Amino acid sequence: MGTPDFARRPLEYLYKNTRHKVLAVVTGPDKPSGRGLKLVSTPVKSKAMELNLPVFTPESLKDDSFIEAMKIIPADIFVVVAFRILPEALFTIPPNGSINLHGSLLPKYRGAAPINWAIINGETETGLTTFFLRKKVDTGSVIFQEKIQIGPEETFSELYERMSELAGPVIERTLDLIESGKAETSHQDERLATPAPKITPFDCMIDWGFPSRNVVNFIRGMSSVPGAFTYMRGKKLKIFRAKAVIAEMGGKHRPGEVIKNKNRLTVVTADGAVEITELLPEGKSVMSGEQFLRGYRLGEEEVFGERPKGNLE
């Protein structure tokens, strides 16, 4: 059971590289997308169809007919990766229960966006956790954990890709432990629990009033999806990469102010400055900071972050 690309890779791995048999796939319904609102399948459904696996796309996981259909499938266990919250009537169907793979070292970063928040908060280590599902989200007994180092400049998209590739082997290891009866579960320490709530569009706006390292981590944690952003002259700028720098600023400058620093696009923060190395101006293509400076004539007191009137994003 899964929806996004993160779940597609472990599905393919389990199907092609393990002795465990995938009997069916549950994912989200097709949704309209693009200008023509053409119906588009989830990445998991597309892969399942390619592998000729039976696919279920229920609107509601509580639907009686869907629950009955799941009871008919002779599955030993349900495997959940990046999916919706399962009702108890569903996750208790298999004789061996249901397991979930989560993108953090639980109980740290419980919630919908664990990879983003780990980077935003400056973590140098994260991981993958498998656990048995229970009623309260992300609180079940831990079966297996794989620690993963976060690179000092690694972005959300880069870490997402790495963790997705590792998800299949971690699930395989978990299934092997359960099947052999060697799975030694452990309860999560509630005192160590931290949240990782869903990222909203408002959460993505850069606050230049934070220290440089915080700003850089924020940009890394949002890059490239959904993308940290700021405003310039009423237009949105998505910032994909930046680094803390020592800038020859002189005088007094306010956070968000753009400093002319040779060919480097440098923005003032609370304790210094950051250099923006990759960005996406509204209506344009992705470009470097140097390319941006060549294409835009910046004024003497250009400031990033002042949103246009009436814009709530």
Image (spheres, grey):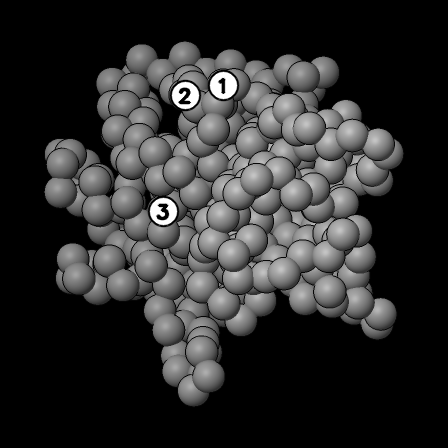
Left or right placement of residue 281 versus residue 181 in this view: right
Which label number is shown at residue 7? 3
Mark toward the start of the polypeptide (3 vs 1): 3
**246 relative to 75, above or below:** above
Q: Are marks 3 and 1 in contact (CB under 8 Å)?
A: no
Residue 20 quadrant: top left
Residue at 53% x, 71% y is 283
The three-letter code of the residue at mark 3 reads Ala
Estimate the x, y position of residue 184 in percent, counting from the top left: 41, 12
Give SS at disc 2. strand
Q: Please state which amino acid type lies under the numbered disc 1.
A: Glu
Looking at the image, the residue that sits furthest to the bottom is: 36
- Dot 3 alpha-carbon crowd within 10 angstroms: few under 14, some 14 to 19, many 20 or more: many
* Front disc: 3 or 1: 1
Considering only order in the chain, which callout, 2 or 3, is on the residue closer to the N terminus? 3
Does the rendering let one see residue 211?
A: no
Q: Between residues 174 and 271, which one lies in front from this camera angle?
A: 271
Which amino acid does the dot numbered 2 rest on? Ile
Does 179 sit above or below residue 295? above
Q: Secondary structure at mark 1?
A: strand
Residue in the image at 48% along x and 23% along y:
152
Residue identified by numbered label 2? 148
Residue 116 coordinates in the image, percent (x, y): 56, 38
Q: Are marks 2 and 1 in contact (CB under 8 Å)?
A: yes
**Residue 248, x across and y down, in percent:** 69, 28
**Element under disc 3:** helix
